[in-house]
Image (cartoon, grey):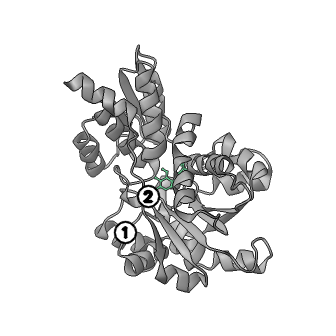
Amino acid sequence: MEASLAEHAKAKHFHTVTPLLESWALSQVAGTTVFLKCENVQPAGSFKIRGIGHFCQEAAKKGCRHLVCSSGGNAGIAAAYSAQRLGIPATIVLPEGASLKVVKRLQGEGAEVQLSGKVWDEANLKAQELAKRDGWVNVSPFDHPLIWEGHSSLVRELKAVLGTPPGVLVLAVGGGGLLAGVSAGLAEVGWQHVPIVAMETRGAHCLNAAIEAGRLVTLPNITSVAKSLGAKTVVARALECAQDFKILSEVVEDAEAVSAVQRFLDDERMLVEPACGAALAAIYSGILGKLQAEGHLPPSLASVVVIVCGGNSIDSQELQSLKARVGQS
Ligand SMILES: Cc1ncc(COP(=O)(O)O)c(C=O)c1O
């Protein structure tokens, strides 16, 4: 019985086809129709399940017997969730200071949690070490073609609902996996001309720094409160996408991302991480209007699609403390 359940899990993808909602409030702010691609309602709390679920299913087909991941964030939760669905054990390696809440959440998904090192890079080394064991596979949070392929499903869903391409697509960039996947999806459905506004917060702006330098740049530190965007170096594929697609890279301050989280909660009654607030700030902070005024986007846009990437590391208490940190309480 168990074996057949696991077989079934290997065949069907783990993500949900998410709603595309027209937002009256954001449309008012943007001056055009804004659609929200609600990845916040995915199982495991973010779009990450699309790519990571796909990667884990493919790994299982190839005989993986144990999944390991060094993210305590949304990628780790997606990996633990996928492992549980596949009936494969998972080990999530976190740095020693990891919050008890995250540890409990991962254990709730059936994963074993190991603490190693002081920072993520050290935990990641441990994960890579473990992945050398026979049958163990390391799950990268954003750096694998299968992960991008999984994320690209989001664009097929957009095409199925919208039919015609939106005027612009807005998303947040951390390590660049979502950007790489969405770009692949746009090419697949023939929408490669649709501009993508790629949003980052200052202090986690590794794509923006790379585009400005014309090469990959490693940030010295992650100083933004949007920890889910906290990759020091963007994946090389994301920088290539900036050459192959129309990508407009924009950076907002933490205060703008946090304020967007609060406004979105009030407008749409949905609570998301600052990582997602960075994308929403494209509307709330007038970035789209600025890009139109500068001639980077057409003066009139058919519609705007914002990928509401979601995120688990947020609750009302955390929002209060984020607001205090950025001087908004
Ligand atoms: C909620 C959320 N939004 C956006 C991102 C950025 O995604 P990527 O690292 O694929 O660029 C992440 C990454 O963890 C995330 O968790």
At label 2, the amino acid type is Glu
Mark nearer the N terminus (1 vs 2): 2
Picture residue at 75% right of the left edge, 72% below the top: 297
Q: Is residue 321 left or right of residue 36?
A: left
Mark 2: few/some/many CA within 10 Å (<14, 14-19, 20+): many
Q: Which quadrant holds the C terminus? A: bottom left
Expressed as whole percent of the image width and height from the top left, the position of residue 318 reads 34, 66
Spatial CA span between label 1 and label 2? 12 Å
At label 1, the amino acid type is Leu
Q: Is residue 321 left or right of residue 33?
A: left
Ligand 1 contact, mark 2 (Cβ < 8 Å): yes
Is 214 or 329 nearer to us in this picture? Answer: 214
Q: Is residue 262 above or below residue 116?
A: below
Q: Secondary structure at mark 1?
A: loop
Expressed as whole percent of the image width and height from the top left, the position of residue 175 reads 58, 47
Picture residue at 45% right of the left edge, 20% below the top: 62
Can residue 9 be seen in the rendering of this structure?
yes
Residue occupied by mark 1: 271
Residue 78, by quadrant, is top left
Q: Is residue 194 left or right of residue 62?
A: right
Total of numbered circles in the picture?
2
Picture residue at 41% right of the left edge, 81% below the top: 267
Picture residue at 24% right of the left edge, 40% below the top: 107
Mark 1: few/some/many CA within 10 Å (<14, 14-19, 20+): many
Residues at marks 1 and 2 touching, judged by CB atoms closer than 8 Å: no
| Residue at the farthest left position | 1
Expressed as whole percent of the image width and height from the top left, the position of residue 36 reads 49, 68
Q: Nearer the viewer, mark 1 or mark 2?
A: 2
Instruction: Name the mark on residue 39.
Output: 2
Q: Is residue 268 above or below residue 82?
A: below
Q: Which quadrant holds the N terminus? A: top left
Expressed as whole percent of the image width and height from the top left, the position of residue 279 reads 55, 66
